[in-house]
Amino acid sequence: MEYIGKQISIKRTENEVSIVIVALATKLKNTLLFACFFLWSVSGIIIMTQFFVTPDQNTKAALLVGLAFWIYFEFRLFKAYMWRKYGVEKIKLRDQKVLYKRDVAGRGKIKTYEFDFIKDLRVLIPKENSFADNMSNSYWSVAGERLAFDYYGKEIKFGFQLEPADAEALYKILKKQIR
């Protein structure tokens, strides 16, 4: 087994190359992310209780709008926490196919891509002064993919928040195998 950086491990057999990319996580940041999730949950519960005790219909409407936003961000925080705690990207190259799975605690769907239809494999380089790229690289975000290819006209991205050197090394391995 060989390793690229802190996140990527590669296992080669006669018929297959198996690549595992683990989510980059630190104990302190995970604890803080869980605390944020917990406090966000408590605040939502408090807002929900106010919905039932408020007689004014306009206030109830405003609380419903606020709860809709709360539910969205509750889901996003939960998803980010689970990804950081249990997230793994699994890539297998065998039989002229790429098998890709975004695995979170043993759950995830395997997607299959045939070598013949993979076009323009590339490394995605984030812009240094881009607000969107900085936000997608944040710890509470499940984004920041560093590799991509086109498949039937659709862009397929993977390699969450890899270091540039690690992304480049993985790109070279994939490019060699997919030829």
Image: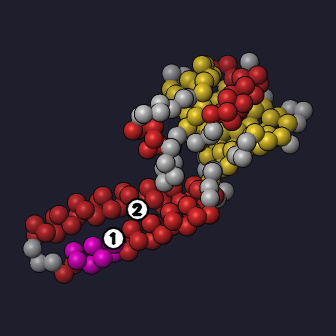
Crowd rating for badge 2 (residues with CA inside 10 Å; few <14, some 14–19, many 20+): some
Task: Tell me: residue 77, above or below residue 112.
Answer: below
Percent x, y for residue 104?
A: 61, 55
From the image, which quarter does the N terminus lie in? top right
On screen, residue 17 versus residue 68, left or right, reads right
**Would residue 123 appear left or right of 9 to someone viewing this image?**
left
Are discs 2 and 1 less than 8 Å apart at CB?
Answer: yes
Assess whether residue 1 is covered by the magenta stretch.
Answer: no
**What residue is pinned by disc 1?**
44
Q: Residue 36 location, x and y as percent?
A: 44, 66
The quarter of the displayed image where residue 130 is located: top left
Give the magenta part as a residue range: 43-51
**Nearer-N-terminus badge (2/1):** 1
The answer to whether residue 60 is above or below residue 97 is below
Judging by the rendered image, the residue that carries numbered circle 2 is 74
Where on the picture, by quarter, is residue 12? Answer: top right
Q: Hey, what amino acid is under mark 1?
A: Gly
Visible in this render: residue 156? no
